[in-house]
Amino acid sequence: MGRDRAPTACPERRHPRLKWWDEAALVALTRLHPRARPVSPGDWRFAGRVIRRGRRLADLDDAALQKAAQALRPALLEQGLTGPAVTDSFALVREATFRTLGYRHHKVQIMGARHILAGHLTEMATGEGKTATTALAACTAALAGVPTHVVTVNEYLRERDYETLRPIYDLLGLSSAQVAPDTDPAAKAEAYRAAILHVSNTTLVFDYLRGRLGRDDLVSPQRRAAMRLAQGAAPPVTPPGLSFAIVDEVDSILIDEAQTPLIIAAPHQQVGAEDCALALSVARGLRQGADFTIRADARRIDLTDAGRQRVARAIDAAAGLWTIPRAREELIGHALSALHLHHRDQHYIVTEGKVQIVDEFTGRVLADRQWQAGLHQMVEVKEGLTVSEARRTLAQITYQEFFRRYLWFGGMSGTLSEVGRELSRVYDRPIARIPTNRRLRRRHFRTRLFRGEPRKIAAIVARARRMARKGRPVLIGTRSVDVSERISVALGAHPHQVLNARQDAEEARIIATAGVAGQITIATNMAGRGTDIKLSDAARQAGGLHVILSEFHESRRIDRQLMGRAGRQGDPGSTEAFVAVTDPVLRRFAGGLCAFARLMPWPVPGRLPSILATPLRRSAQARAERLGARNRAATLRRSARLADLMAFTGHRTQ
Ligand SMILES: Nc1ncnc2c1ncn2[C@@H]1O[C@H](COP(=O)(O)OP(=O)(O)OP(=O)(O)O)[C@@H](O)[C@H]1O
């Protein structure tokens, strides 16, 4: 290792404070940052050395292997995580992986782990085995005495990855644990002391926030009392120090989820059901364009002057909040937003009499989360449900702010190149691009463009049936619960399975059978990131998994994640997209171009020339990404200001 230019280890902790111009100039400035860097010849030499070093370990029995791992500790401590001891450590973990999982890491995985350990953001193509790569970095850091958090994007992946890697940790004599949201506090506290902890991003951040609220030196007695009210008698669990984290699907956490702060809230005064009902009835009488405008791309509704006057006239006799112009406009704003921007089975589902928010990017239910400031209650009244308690914010943090509190962290994902520049600018981290182990055998067919959804769904169904008859498993990806259900209805009696926010309990079973020959699975983004669909032999011989995108997403990365379910580890597979100019993302972000495209004459009924699909997609996704980048910069600036304010008022921000 000495001769190679090793990646810098443990980069300094930085807290860049973004200035006012960041928001406007972020997109332009990020262009100055280099895109992902390919691996260096030194990385290849390092991987070769690990493999050679491992050959000597084959003769050791399990006990001797564990002893050898423990004997490495002093060398790792002394040399740090860039010294020659890392080569030995990787060789040991690779051997332990072979004994427990039955395969040895490929060179590309060794290189990936080296970059993760160095705190780089690492792009490894989908299906290249990032779970096993994690083991190399996590075990090495843990052997060096660094408490390591392996952070996943959801609970399903947390459990799957922990169950997969645990035998390796056990064999090497490393303590490990996983934390679920419902783990009891005593077990949680114990788990946070393990050398390697597997935890989902949400659980980790909420435990961190609760822990801070529970600390006397950080929080006022009033806040703590409110906190106790919010979470019963359960004592808060504090993750003891944020040292090193390995963040899986790092772009999902630091980009897609960056705009929404995680909030701990306590019960607050009730937003009256009558107020909500009145606001909804007034809002229903307002005319789009004349009384209010919708900026669909920014998901914003503004009342016009005429609208304000109309509202004032409509609630003439109302009292209380309604007499204050700002308060009534906020109520009407929420009512309009509930009616026009928040759609059932797309943005939320209704189960057991409750409104449950569905995450746009992952397709999963965000348990126990509420929209803020009375909007949630407005949606409940719109759905005719009992109004829940409104809550008041006690503590909040964004993922971007949270992960900057680690001494250092490494991340990985199959889709970093699109956001590499933004990530490297905000986190000051290099992005490494790791090559694939084998040539990718996935084929991408031409995108079909339709005038409207009915024809599109009919074509998807016909295509899925044809593929299934050939013995190929088919995965149809949708952006929302309702589209997944519409396709399911269109498939009728043809055997198929559906995975969406309503079936999350059956996720593991559905995924386990999705790779069987002839199986059709319709899934929201829940089957996107991280999902490993194992092919049966017959399915592999028939040509592997065929993925159909039923809509483009706001970000190309999410499209690529879904397509990445096919053609993993050198398997055959194919992908294609069936989209319509009426799809929400195209309409919202490329409305003008879509209207123009519809004017095109085309001989096939219901169809439009496929050649238009790419420019439409590029234009819509570029606009959505630009808007997203701006919002993220604004969020980061706000949370940086909040951190300043808390420091000023005596609340340390660690
Ligand atoms: N070195 C290896 N040799 C053989 N099989 C491997 C190896 N590494 C990983 N695999 C297998 O490859 C498959 C994909 O692994 P994994 O789910 O970790 O990929 P991933 O890179 O995380 O994918 P995604 O980007 O979709 O999350 C798994 O079935 C795993 O068992």
Image: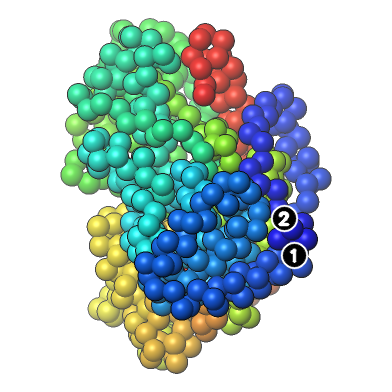
Vertical order, 466 against 261 (above or below): below
Residue 130 as seen in the image, left or right of residue 390: right
Please tell me the numbered disc located at residue 42. Answer: 1
Q: Position of residue 54 (x, y in %)?
A: 55, 73
Q: Position of residue 318 (x, y in %)?
A: 31, 11
Q: Quadrant of the N terminus?
A: bottom right
What amino acid type is highlighted by mark number 2?
Answer: Ala
Q: Nearer the viewer, residue 139 or 637?
A: 139
CB under 8 Å between callouts 1 and 2? yes
Give the class, few, some or many, for how many residues have Cα within 10 Å of label 1's Cα (few <14, many ≥20). some
- What residue is at 29 percent from the left and 57 percent from the top? 504
What amino acid type is highlighted by mark number 1?
Answer: Gly
Q: Residue furthest right?
A: 32
- What residue is at 56 percent from the left and 25 percent from the top? 639
Q: Is residue 552 visible?
A: no
- Label 1 and label 2: CA atoms lie apart by 8 Å
